[in-house]
Amino acid sequence: MTETARAEAGSLDLTGPAFFQDPYPSYARLRARREPVYNDTTHAWMITRFADVESVLRDPRISKKIQRATATPFETSVLFRDPPDHGRIRGLLNRVFAEIPENLEDRVLRIAEGLI
């Protein structure tokens, strides 16, 4: 890949209105790289191929913790916790969700439909 293409992939604006209107061209450019991309806007490495993502998520040497001065609620979720916190919280959540009554799905669907 040329230096121009590397710079373009690394400077993709993933937070602007153009991205949210149509993110697929940006995704296509990232996938075309076929290697990790450091994004200057988000200050994060991005990987897009399934095998790479799976490998990174399973590698205990790589932390899932997002380190920012102010994290969003999504970033503080169990998804971004490292062991042993991840396993402990996931176990608690599994027990809670296992006890949810089966008829709750219908209720959630009715509420969601009423909101849209």
Image (cartoon, rainbow, N blue to C red):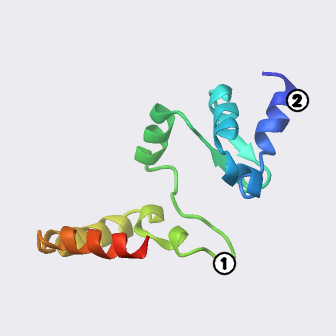
* Residue at image location 74% in from the left, 48% down from the top: 39
Gap in Å between the C-alphas at discs 1 and 2? 33 Å
Question: Please, what is the three-letter code of the amino acid marked with disc 1?
Answer: Thr
Residue placed under numbered mark 1 in the picture: 70
- Residue 60 place in picture, x, y as percent: 43, 50
Residue shown at 35% from the left, 69% from the top: 113
* Residue under the point 59% across and 64% down: 66
Q: Residues within 10 Å of mark 2 (few under 14, many from 20)?
A: few
| Quadrant location, the N terminus | top right
Instruction: Give the image location of residue 63, x and y in percent.
Output: 52, 56
- On residue 4, the disc is 2
Q: Nearer the viewer, residue 87 or 110?
A: 110
Q: Nearer the viewer, residue 47 or 98?
A: 98
SS class, disc 2:
helix
**Among the 4 quarters of the image, the one containing residue 32:** top right
Q: In the visual, does 76 lie left or right of 2?
A: left
